[in-house]
């Protein structure tokens, strides 16, 4: 192209000899020109006309060759990320099923562990906080009060812990195969729904043991399960992306989960707080979820204000997490 442009620059309107012909041929070659009877160059038009067309072609070629094609990483796109993840839903379900199988592989009790964990925590909390500390429970038997809060909390804490370590445990997939990285931290969250369903089975005999008759509130239970799942996905995805770069996350996360437990109304009701403390606790998205979870199982009024705050904070966390995840996911294969 440089040779063609140099030849064209040296040509004049009166000299359209060998240099112009050579330049014209080069320009035509670079622009992909093919011989045709309709072409001015092929039919042998006048030199002045050929020179004008040569200049036009050379200018076009210059624009083509001086333009640059820049390849850059994709920008964070909330809708695009979710749509792409949905197209790979079969892989997502496969990864979730793989997590379920690996979780209970070679275990004597199998899926029973999904009940044992919140059950023993309920017994401990009932003795320490219900009998010894005598923490109020909004006129609900403390054992049922504690278990109704532990079921969503256990699902949430296990989901974000497994999700935070999911990218580190999928190094071979990330470095060899392309797929939406978002589905890796999402798979452990979906796998945890099985444990949640099993743990909910124990609530049925507990409710009838204490003589509580469920109301229409029970119909809203799937809504709070969905909110817990969405929140676990958002927090887990953010922690997973952070864990790739800073491996301290895996050590700090259990401590943060414990702090989050005591900052959530699992062992105490929200009603014991007043003023600014109640407002600050309401900013914790698990507060409205746990309170709504209990109100769905035990007939009592919903605190829609707190639930509304939890919904807003939950989707804000998810939006920020997806944005940050997509912003840094291109570098996962380099640092993982």
Image (cartoon, helix red, strand yellow):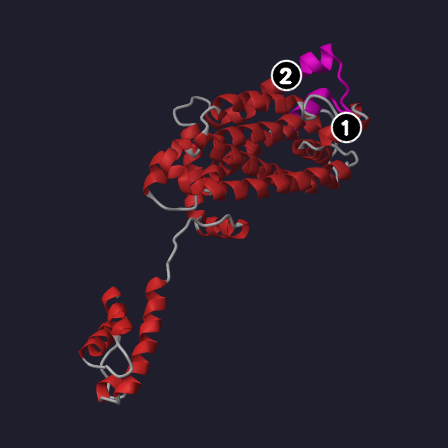
Give the magenta range. Answer: 123-148
Residue at the (68%, 12%) spot, across then down? 128
Q: Indicate the quadrant containing the C terminus: top left, top right, bottom left or bottom right.
A: top left
- Give how far across and how far down residue 164 sits, in percent: 49, 31
- Front residue of 233/213: it is 233
Within-10-Å neighbours for mark 1: few <14, some 14–19, many 20+: some
Q: Residue at x 76, y 22 (%)?
A: 137
The nearer-to-camera label among 2 and 1 is: 1
Q: In this view, does 259 lie to the left or right of 55?
A: right
The numbered mark at residue 278 is 1
Residue 135 lies within the magenta run:
yes
State the residue position of label 2.
123
Residue drawn at x 58%, y 41% as measured from the top left: 320
- SS for callout 1: helix
- Count of marks overlaid on the render: 2
Q: Does the magenta stretch include residue 303?
A: no
SS assignment for the magenta stretch, majority: helix
Most foreground residue, 154 or 313: 313
Image coords of residue 210 (percent x, y): 73, 24
For the residues labelled 2 and 1, the Cα–Cα distance comes to 27 Å
Front residue of 272 and 24: 24
- Looking at the rendered structure, the secondary structure element under dot 2 is helix
The residue drawn where x is 59% and y is 18% is: 120
Residue 264: name its quadrant.
top right
Horizontally, is 12 left or right of 228 in the view?
left
**Residue 236 placed where, x, y %?**
53, 34
**Can you see residue 331?**
yes
Image quadrant in which the N terminus is located: bottom left
> Is residue 109 left or right of 197 when viewed as pictured?
left
Q: Which of marks 2 and 1 is nearer the N terminus?
A: 2
Q: Residue 152 carries which label?
A: none
Residue 64 appears left or right of 299:
left
């Amino acid at each position: 192209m440089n040779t063609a442009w140099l030849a064209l620059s040296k040509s004049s309107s009166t000299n359209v000899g060998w240099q112009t012909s050579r330049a014209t041929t080069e320009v035509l070659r670079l622009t992909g020109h093919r011989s045709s009877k309709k072409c001015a160059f092929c039919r042998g038009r006048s030199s002045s006309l050929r020179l004008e067309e040569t200049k036009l072609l050379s200018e076009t070629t210059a624009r083509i060759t001086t333009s640059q094609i820049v390849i850059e990483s994709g920008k964070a796109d909330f809708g695009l990320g979710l749509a792409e993840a949905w197209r790979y839903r079969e892989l997502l379900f496969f990864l979730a099923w793989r997590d379920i199988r690996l979780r209970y592989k070679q275990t004597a009790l199998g899926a029973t562990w999904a009940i044992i964990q919140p059950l023993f925590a309920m017994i401990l909390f009932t003795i320490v906080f219900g009998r010894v500390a005598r923490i109020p429970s909004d006129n609900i038997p403390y054992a049922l009060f504690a278990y109704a809060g532990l079921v969503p909390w256990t699902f949430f804490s296990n989901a974000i812990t497994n999700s935070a370590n999911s990218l580190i445990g999928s190094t071979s997939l990330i470095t060899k195969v392309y797929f939406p990285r978002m589905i890796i931290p999402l798979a452990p969250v979906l796998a945890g729904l099985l444990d949640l369903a099993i743990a909910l089975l124990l609530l049925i005999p507990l409710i009838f043991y204490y003589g509580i008759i469920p109301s229409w509130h029970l119909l809203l239970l799937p809504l709070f399960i969905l909110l817990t799942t969405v929140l676990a996905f958002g927090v887990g995805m953010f922690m997973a992306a952070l864990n790739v770069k800073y491996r301290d996350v895996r050590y700090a996360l259990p401590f943060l989960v414990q702090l989050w437990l005591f900052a959530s109304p699992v062992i105490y009701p929200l009603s014991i707080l007043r003023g600014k403390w109640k407002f600050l606790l309401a900013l914790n998205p698990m507060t409205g979820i746990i309170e709504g979870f209990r109100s769905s199982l035990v007939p009592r009024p919903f605190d829609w204000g707190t639930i509304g705050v939890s919904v807003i904070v939950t989707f804000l966390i998810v939006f920020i997490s997806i944005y940050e995840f997509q912003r840094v996911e291109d570098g996962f294969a380099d640092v993982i």
